[in-house]
Amino acid sequence: QALDAGAPEKVIKKLLEAYPQAAHTKCGEQNRLPIHYHLASKAATPKESIVSLLIESFPESTRAGDADNQFPIHLACQATQVSGHIFALLLSSFPEGACVRDIHGNYPCDYATWNEDAVTKKIALSALVQNDAMEMSRSFRHKPLSKPRIFDEHPPSARTQKRKRLENEVSFSILNSFDDEIHQ
């Protein structure tokens, strides 16, 4: 509750020192961990130092969904004034989180696309595209390449569809920002 209310870092640090299990404890109607509350707080913008402290206290927190199966990356994509470092912390801890749908069928990139904070939208989409590229690179290093096919009879996977949609959204977002700059 302290995180939801926008408590300062020193208060959070003292609470975690006194009760380290707090970082592991889900609570509330949404069944959220402290990291969820911090990223979803309307009282304060997410702070790098607090996100870092919470991940350090409970590294698995980035892999935990709430009652709506929203992971911290989903909530960061919905928040405002989120730094690139916060996205880097979340995605480096759980890169697969970018490919998880919540119970509404939405990926983190969907929430980033809908975010009305233009700066956070750009940062989030950029971080998600970069994360996806790194994931693809990692998977190619560990899997032998199959024979190329000219015609693929199988529809693209959900991951491929998400990647294409994300690439299109980033391209559209960048084009819009350039268009806005030109017309000013």
Image: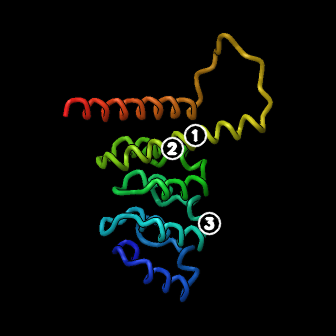
Looking at this rendering, what residue extends furthest in the left direction?
184
Q: Which residue is mark 3?
A: 59
Q: Residues within 10 Å of mark 1 (few under 14, many from 20)?
A: many
Q: Which residue is mark 1?
A: 132
Foreground: 72 or 101?
72
Q: Amino acid at mark 3?
A: Pro
- Does residue 156 appear left or right of residue 166 in this picture? right
Looking at this rendering, what residue extends furthest in the right direction?
144
Q: Residue 106, can we see it?
A: no
In the image, which disc is placed on residue 161?
A: none
Q: Amino acid at mark 1?
A: Asp
Return the disc, 1 or 3, that comes first in the chain's sequence.
3
Quadrant assignment for the C terminus: top left
- Judge whether 87 appears above or below 164 on screen: below
- Judge whether 97 appears above or below 62 on screen: above
Residue 116, how many percent across, how many down? 29, 47
> Does the residue at mark 2 contact the one at mark 1 (Cβ under 8 Å)?
yes
Q: Amino acid at mark 2?
A: Leu
**In this rendering, the label closer to the viewer, 3 or 2:** 2
The residue located at (46%, 53%) in the rendering is: 84
| Quadrant housing residue 170 | top left
| Quadrant housing residue 141 | top right
Label 1 to label 3: alpha-carbon separation: 21 Å
Looking at this rendering, what residue extends furthest in the top direction?
150
Q: Which residue is mark 2?
A: 128
At mark 1, the secondary structure is helix
- Does residue 59 appear left or right of residue 145 in this picture? left
Q: How was this image coloured? A: rainbow
